[in-house]
Amino acid sequence: MASAVKIFTGSASRYLAQQICHEYGIPLGKEILMRFADGEFQPSYEETLRGHEVYIVQSTFQPAENILELLLMIDAARRASAKQVIAVIPYFGLGRQDRKDKPRVPIGAKLMANLLTAAGVNRVITMDLHADQIQGFFDVPVDHLYASTIFVPYIKSLDLPNLVIGSPDTGGTRRAATYAKFVNGELVICYKQRLKANKVERMMLIGDVKGKNVILVDDIIDTAGSIIMAGEMVMENGANSVRAVCTHPVFSKNAVERLNDSVFSEIIVSDTIPLTIESPKITVLSTAKLFANVIERVHSHQSISTHYGFSTMT
């Protein structure tokens, strides 16, 4: 007898998990989160998990409680005799700590992988990791999806003439080049220098944007400083318009307000992280159908290469 799929959610991603369940065609699993007076919390499943495939949806953005809640839910599912425990992590927090970029610092992404494995996860489904090599930090299968499967069709629907795809930094050149290929656009690169995290000291443009409609592609917008500086530089160099595409809208501090006052005509993001402030400039594209389809394919042992390989996009 085949195991049944049950989908649960942590507190941070309930909005997305409900949409995933709607697309999949099953109700969201029942669980509660009990909190003690001192702030300690304990998740509890309110239905049987024995012999089932359990999918737990939880992005691990700040606060760090989101990470701990996911780990506790994985441990509880394993102890409740779930057949498989799969963590669906739309936004993998600490992904920017994928290497030692200076002495005496942790590799946070590797530590996260170790913690998830130790908790008992059997598989991880995530989207647009900050660095592809993070997949290798895990000793369990990782399905690394690309948000390009939802962004590229939207970009094409805009039908922008003289389209140019840009990267706000050299690290995103490969991503931008791939977008450019599939939307038949040109490519430009913004080269930036940092003296410390979240602060760009200098930026220059590589490529021609005069008379063009530019879309800057990035995986994360945090304080929005870099992307706004890149947008201003693009417009100063003669672009007709500039838009931004971002998978994970971290939007720290007053990022949304800064984007509202920026040169961008539109900021296109996914719903891997919930927006707490609405903005007329921000367009949110849902990832629910994509994740629901991948869950169905994983459950039925079908290929999901069309969702995490750029080369299969049309």
Image (cartoon, rainbow, N blue to C red):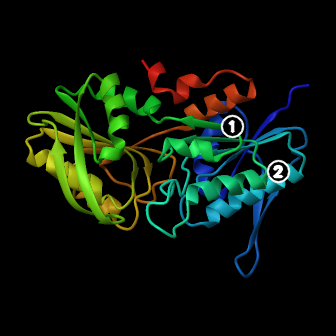
Q: Is residue 80 above or below residue 212?
A: below
- Which residue sits furthest front? 103
Residue at 63% from the left image edge and 33% from the top image edge: 292
Q: Secondary structure at mark 2?
A: helix
Residue displayed at 18% across by 34% down: 213
Q: Which image quarter holds the N terminus?
A: top right
Q: Please, what secondary structure does the residue beneath circle 1 have?
A: loop
Q: Is residue 139 above or below residue 2?
A: below
The quarter of the image holding the C terminus is: top left
Q: Amino acid at mark 1?
A: Pro
User: Residue 200, position in %: x, y?
Assistant: 26, 62
Q: Residues within 10 Å of mark 1 (few under 14, many from 20)?
A: some
Asked whether, in this view, residue 254 is left or right of residue 48, the answer is: left
Q: Is 259 located above or below residue 29 in the figure?
A: below
**Residue 194 place in picture, x, y as percent:** 29, 62
Relative horizontal placement of residue 256, taking residue 285 as reference (left or right):
left
Whichever of callouts 2 and 1 sits on the residue coming sooner in the sequence is 2
- Compare residues 115 and 60 and report the one nearer the observer: 115
| Front in this rendered view, residue 29 or 191 | 191
Q: Is residue 190 left or right of residue 53?
A: left
Q: Which dot marks residue 77?
A: 2
Measure how far apart labels 2 and 1 are at the Cα level: 18 Å
Residue 141: image tag: 1
Q: Quadrant of residue 254?
A: bottom left
- Report the residue that reaches farthest toward the bottom: 38
Query: Above or below — where is 47 with respect to 289?
Result: below
Identify which amino acid the numbered label 2 is placed on: Ala
Is any part of residue 259 visible from this angle?
no
Task: From the viewer's side, name the closer residue of 87 and 158.
Answer: 87
Q: Residues within 10 Å of mark 2 (few under 14, many from 20)?
A: many
